[in-house]
Amino acid sequence: GAVVSQHPSWVICKSGTSVKIECRSLDFQATTMFWYRQFPKQSLMLMATSNEGSKATYEQGVEKDKFLINHASLTLSTLTVTSAHPEDSSFYICSARDVATTNNEQFFGPGTRLTVL
Amino acid sequence: SQQGEEDPQALSIQEGENATMNCSYKTSINNLQWYRQNSGRGLVHLILIRSNEREKHSGRLRVTLDTSKKSSSLLITASRAADTASYFCVSSGGSYIPTFGRGTSLIVHP
C-alpha cells in the first residue's frame, strides 16, 4: 500500500522554541493532507486540512498562528508548532489522500511525538 | 466527518486465545483500514480492505467487511503478549475526512 512518512519520529524541545514536523507521501501525490493530534490514551483529533498551494483549513479551537501548516508540494506538508509550550506535548499524526485513484484513498503516517520541556 | 467506532473499548485475553474487535462506520466507504498503536508509540498499518472485498488475511490477522451493515471486524488468532496495543479502524474514500474512534485496547496476558 501507499506509504506516508513523518520526520522526526520524536522530538524534545525547550519551551518557547519552534518545531517543524514533516509529512511526506512517498509513492503517490497528495493534494490534500491532514494533521491530527493525539493526547495520551485518547483518540486522534483532526487539527487541520492541508491543501497543496493554498491555505490550510483549521478545525474549531485550533490556533492557526500556533500551528503553521505549509503544503508546498504534492508530496510534502509541514506542521510547525510555534513558541511551543509543555501543553503542546502530544503525538502528531498526518495523513495523505491519494488523488491518483478514483477512490481517494487516504493513508496515515506513523506519527511524531513532541515533548516540550 | 466519518468516524470509525471500535467495539469493545477494552479486551483482556490470555495468550493463545483469539481476539475479535469490531468497527462500525456511518457512510459509504472505498476502503477501511486497521491500525495498531502500542502505548506511546506511532501508528502501525495492519491491513486495508476495499469496499468490494469481504474478507482479507494477513498472517494471524483476518479482517472482514460487511458494507450492508457498515461494519468490519478484526480477528487476531493465537494472540501473543506482543499483540497488546490499541487497535483503530478508519474508513477512507470519497470527499469526507476520516477520523478515528477511541480504539480497542487489547491486553494479552502471557
Image (tube, grey):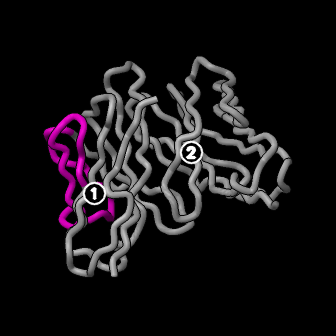
Q: Identify the amino acid type marked 2.
A: Tyr
Q: Quadrant of the N terminus of chain B?
A: top left
Q: Residue B35: which numbered mark, if any?
A: 2
Pick whichever, A30 or B5, lies toward us. Answer: A30
Label 2's element? strand
Is B5 placed left or right of A46 in the picture? right
One can see residue A59 in this view: no
Is A43 placed left or right of B72 in the picture? left
Please tell me how crowded label 1 is: few (under 14), some (14-19), or many (20+) other residues with Cα within 10 Å: many
Q: Identify the amino acid type marked 1.
A: Ile
Residue underneath mark 1: A21
Note whether B92 is above or below A72 in the view shown.
above
Residue at image coords 34%, 56%: A47
Q: Position of residue A66 (x, y in %)?
A: 22, 67
Note whether B34 is above or below A113 in the view shown.
above
Pick whichever, B4 or A14, lies toward us. Answer: A14
Q: To which chain does the residue with label 1 belong?
A: A
Residue A63 in magenta stretch: yes
* Residue A106: quarter of image: top left
Q: Residue A103: which numbered mark, if any?
A: none
Q: Quadrant of the C terminus of chain B?
A: bottom right
Please tell me how crowded label 2 is: few (under 14), some (14-19), or many (20+) other residues with Cα within 10 Å: many
Q: To which chain does the residue with label 2 belong?
A: B
Residue at image coords 56%, 24%: B50
Q: Position of residue A28 (x, y in %)?
A: 31, 28
Magenta stretch in the rendered image: A52-78
Q: Position of residue A100 (x, y in %)?
A: 32, 21
* Residue B89: quarter of image: top right
